[in-house]
Image (tube, rainbow, N blue to C red):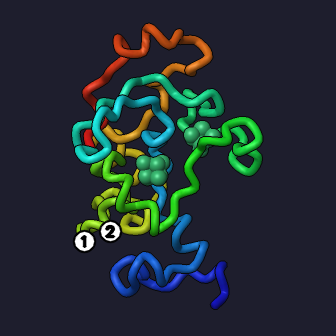
Amino acid sequence: MDNELIRPKFWQQYRLDELTTAEWEALCDGCGACCLEKFLEDPDEPYEVEYTDVACQLLDCDTGYCSNYDNRHLFVPECISLTVDKLQHMMWLPESCAYKRLYLGQRLPKWHLLITQDAVKTEQGMRQAGVGVAGRCISELQVSEEDLEERIVNWVHA
Ligand code: SF4
Ligand code: SF4
């Protein structure tokens, strides 16, 4: 199948493991939450994750986007490339994340770009829903390891 293909309502029609590369990528809303440092004490209790507002060194904290996505593994080898197989171990993702929601049999958020087809509406919807790290995170390069616990935030929920 053509991996550039985006089929109508693919998120309702096909399983996650049946998606093309373009469809898979289109699910990401770019919230940036998965680029935040977090405390995950017990891998068996992923919903008890505590997020901080401290972001990966490559995250642009103004836009909320990775500043060097294509070459990110050269700088951040531990950056996770999300695949269907990994999702079962990633329930620490935010509740709004499309990958997690579809994996759990839930709908996409109503503000998701695939639903609205309108970037401005989606941006407004995400802001209203309190989703997205842009403008409210700080680079890990500016925070020492021992101060991390003081940076726990309550605006990301698994
Ligand atoms: S949490 Fe999910 S939707 Fe948000 S940036 Fe990460 S993969 Fe994309
Ligand atoms: S390398 Fe980029 S995509 Fe990966 S965690 Fe860092 S900012 Fe996010």
Q: Does 140 sit above or below residue 44? A: above
Q: Name the residue under label 1.
A: 105
| Percent x, y of residue 53 | 42, 24
- Image side of residue 14 versus residue 7, left or right: left
Q: Is mark 2 on a helix, strand or loop?
A: helix
Tag 2 and tag 1, C-beta contact below 8 Å: yes
Q: Would you call the spot at circle 1 few (<14 residues within 10 Å), some (14-19), or many (20 or more)?
A: few
Number of numbered discs visible in the structure rendering: 2
Mark 1 CB lies closer than 8 A to ligand 1 = no
Q: Does 96 sit above or below residue 17? A: above
> Which residue appears at 53% of the width and 11% of the height?
143
> Which residue appears at 22% of the width and 37% of the height?
48
Residue 56, by quadrant, is top right
* Residue type (three-letter) at the residue carrying disc 2: Leu
The span from disc 2 to disc 1 (Cα, nearest Å) is 5 Å
- Image side of residue 47 versus residue 80, left or right: left
Looking at the rendered image, the quarter that the C terminus falls into is top left
Residue 124, by quadrant, is top left
Q: Name the residue under label 2.
A: 102
